[in-house]
Image: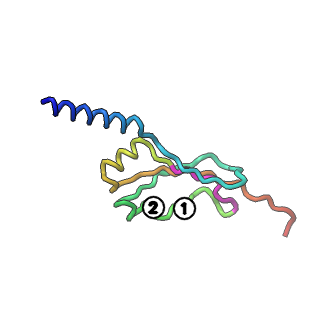
């Protein structure tokens, strides 16, 4: 009986430590001269089967047209996404992608 109580206590402590130290993480990609023209737009993308299948495979930014490029990209996961990934043993992994478009370049002169 004493062994069961101590193993239960250790399990509870490990669970508490793992949950309390869990947080989200972010990866941010910026240009050297950051000058955004838009606010953040976002989309949740999913990876299945440990990255073998990605949805979407190629993510095309819908609001940055030909005359302006990406200014900033932010890839984020949170506690809920981490729980889903762990609970499915990596079979399902969602990520949130946010981006801003760069201001169009200034054209000098005329053609």
Instruction: Name the one closer to the observer, 72 or 103.
Output: 72
Q: Quickly name the residue at label 2.
A: 56
- To which residue does mark 1 refer? 60
- Left or right of 89, for residue 75: right
Colour basis: rainbow
Q: Which residue is drawn at 51% across and 61% down?
A: 59
Within 10 angstroms of label 1, few (less than 14), some, or many (20 or more) residues? Answer: few
Q: Which of 59 and 11 is in front in this view?
A: 11
Image quarter in which the N terminus is found = top left
Q: In this view, does 27 lie above or below 17?
A: below
Residue range of the region highlighted in magenta in the rendering: 67-75
Marker disc for residue 47 = none
Marks 2 and 1, Cα distance to the nearest angstrom? 9 Å
**SS at badge 1:** loop
Q: In which quarter of the image is residue 68?
A: bottom right
Point out residue 98 in the picture as x, y percentages from the top left corner: 55, 50
CB of mark 2 within 8 Å of CB of mark 1?
yes
Location of the C terminus (image quadrant): bottom right
**Number of numbered discs present?**
2
Kindly identify the residue that appears in the image at 33 percent across and 48 percent down: 86
């Amino acid at each position: 009986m004493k062994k069961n109580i101590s193993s239960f206590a250790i399990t509870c402590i490990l669970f508490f430590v793992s949950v309390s130290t869990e947080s989200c993480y972010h990866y941010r990609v910026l240009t050297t001269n950051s000058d955004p023209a838009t606010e953040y737009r976002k989309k949740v993308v999913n990876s299945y089967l440990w990255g073998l299948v990605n949805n979407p495979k190629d993510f095309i930014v819908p609001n940055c047209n030909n005359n302006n490029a990406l200014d900033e990209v932010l890839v984020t996961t949170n506690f809920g996404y981490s729980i889903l990934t762990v609970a499915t043993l990596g079979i399902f992994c969602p990520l949130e992608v946010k981006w801003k478009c760069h201001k169009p370049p200034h054209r000098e002169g005329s053609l």
